[in-house]
């Protein structure tokens, strides 16, 4: 019998539902929330209200597109955390309610595991997927981690940021340049027109496999401050060069820990995931890094880089194979990383 999983994602500002049949994606519906644009960041209370409005139509549409009826579902997988508690509560409560109503298991999923496992969401049954163990560079708005993925359930964080995440460095620097939120995609677009060597920003000197992005952010601010003293139009005149140099530095920082991580773990496959893995420079740099070393690179389709329920459904699929009874229905959502 086929395993049919409905995935539900509501950890931040995207309401998403997806249906996977035996790991093959049948639908992945995402309702993004425009309401936050005016505020330059996600407003938690507005996010939870928008999730409440979106969740029923998004789930119905995901089932309709998949050609699947509720009675066909094997289980409902939902993001339990990390994320905004109010947002998570909507998806968690909906998923549990649906599971109880249908008398099927509810499966809790760690959002970050979902990002890592997004490489296993297949468009066709024949599609290739990574082999264990592999290394995953998980870079998003809230996290920057190097993860040794030994199995769907066994992931070891071997490096992480000690302050800001890579996405935060993109977004905060973009914000001071007057770019809309989230700034990452805008920096990516501008970087194509600029010189990546025009400006030099600080890079961290920390041992091991950990990251730091706060020094880069500070040195970016100092560059703007000094530039604006000389020329009030400094940002406007140099925006492409600033964006290209910022992106270049973030990529250098990210890649500086990849080589030692590969050496230390002996893996032959490297994957990337999370919102920042949508960045064209990051994608190219990791692909080149792997090519020159004879490693296999796994670069996710852009649709699976940002928050989506297909990755939650695939994580749920693996959990379901391990534990078909699902998770305890009394599990509450959690805001912070738990790996
Ligand atoms: O994984 P994600 O959707 O959720 C959070 O962790 O919040 O990641 C969002 C992050 C934001 O910081 C956003 O600016 C960044 O991913 N991002 C990008 C690009 N697309 C999204 N950063 C750089 N270049 C992009 N093309």
Image: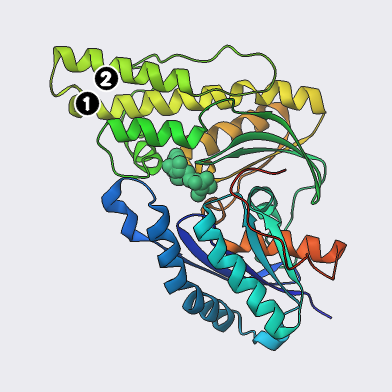
Element under label 2?
Answer: helix
Find residue 296 and report its horizontal and vertical position in percent: 72, 39
Quarter of image, res 293: top right
User: In the image, 161: left or right of 174?
Assistant: right
Q: Is residue 26 visible?
A: no
Q: Earlier in the sequence, mark 2 or mark 1?
A: 2
In the rendered structure, the answer to whether residue 59 lies left or right of residue 332 reads: left
Q: Is residue 141 above or below residue 15?
A: above
Residue furthest out toward the left? 232
Residue at 47% from the left image edge and 22% from the top image edge: 214
Q: Nearer the viewer, residue 335 or 149?
A: 335
Q: Position of residue 194 (x, y in %)?
A: 32, 28
Q: Can you tell which quarter of the image residue 297 is in?
A: top right
Residues tagged 2 and 1 counted as in contact (Cβ below 8 A):
yes
Q: Nearer the viewer, residue 153 or 117?
A: 153
Q: Compared to 71, does 223 lie above or below?
A: above
Q: Is residue 73 visible?
A: yes
* Residue ID at (53%, 81%): 60
Label annotation for residue 224 = 2
Image position of 14 (left or right of 309): left
Disc 1 residue: CB within 8 Å of ligand 1: no
Nearer-the-camera pick, 93 or 121: 93
Q: How many numbered circles are shown?
A: 2
Q: Which mark is residue 80?
A: none
- Marks 2 and 1 sit apart, C-alpha to C-alpha, by 7 Å
As drawn, the label of residue 235 is 1
The relative height of residue 50 versus residue 59 in the rendered view (above or below) is above
Question: What residue appears at the point 40 percent right and 58 percent down from the top-left corner?
Answer: 45
- Does mark 2's beta carbon lie closer than 8 Å to ligand 1? no
Quadrant of residue 124 within the rendered picture: bottom right
């Amino acid at each position: 019998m086929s395993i049919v999983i409905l995935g539900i994602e509501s950890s931040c500002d995207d309401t998403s539902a997806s249906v996977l049949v035996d790991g093959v994606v049948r639908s992945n519906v995402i309702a993004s929330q425009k309401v936050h644009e005016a505020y330059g960041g996600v407003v938690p209370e507005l996010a939870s209200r928008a999730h409440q409005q979106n969740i029923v139509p998004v789930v119905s549409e995901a089932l309709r597109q998949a050609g699947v009826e509720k009675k066909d579902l094997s289980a409902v997988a939902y993001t339990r955390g990390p994320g905004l508690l109010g947002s998570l509560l909507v998806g968690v409560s909906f998923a549990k309610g649906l599971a109880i109503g249908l008398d099927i298991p509810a499966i809790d999923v760690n959002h970050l595991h979902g990002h890592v496992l997004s490489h296993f969401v297949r468009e066709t049954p024949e599609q290739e997927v990574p082999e264990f163990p592999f290394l995953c560079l998980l870079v998003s708005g809230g996290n920057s981690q190097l993860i040794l993925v030994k199995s769907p359930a066994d992931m070891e964080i071997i490096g992480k940021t000690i302050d800001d995440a890579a996405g935060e460095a993109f977004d905060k620097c973009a914000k001071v340049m007057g770019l809309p939120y989230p700034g990452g995609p805008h920096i990516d677009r501008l970087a194509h027109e600029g010189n990546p060597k025009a400006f030099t920003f600080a890079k961290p000197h920390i041992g091991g496999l950990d990251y730091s992005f706060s020094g880069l952010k500070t040195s970016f601010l100092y560059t703007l401050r000094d530039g604006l003293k000389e020329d009030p139009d400094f940002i406007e005149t140099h925006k492409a060069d600033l964006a290209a140099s910022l992106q270049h530095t973030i990529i250098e920082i990210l890649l500086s820990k990849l080589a030692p991580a590969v050496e230390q773990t002996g893996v032959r496959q490297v994957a990337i995931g999370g919102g920042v893995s949508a960045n064209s420079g990051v994608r190219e740099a990791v692909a080149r890094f792997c090519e020159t070393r004879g490693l296999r690179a796994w670069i996710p389709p852009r649709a699976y880089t940002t928050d989506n329920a297909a990755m939650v459904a695939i994580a749920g699929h693996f959990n379901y194979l391990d534990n078909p009874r699902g998770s305890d229905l009394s599990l509450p959502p959690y805001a912070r990383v738990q790996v």
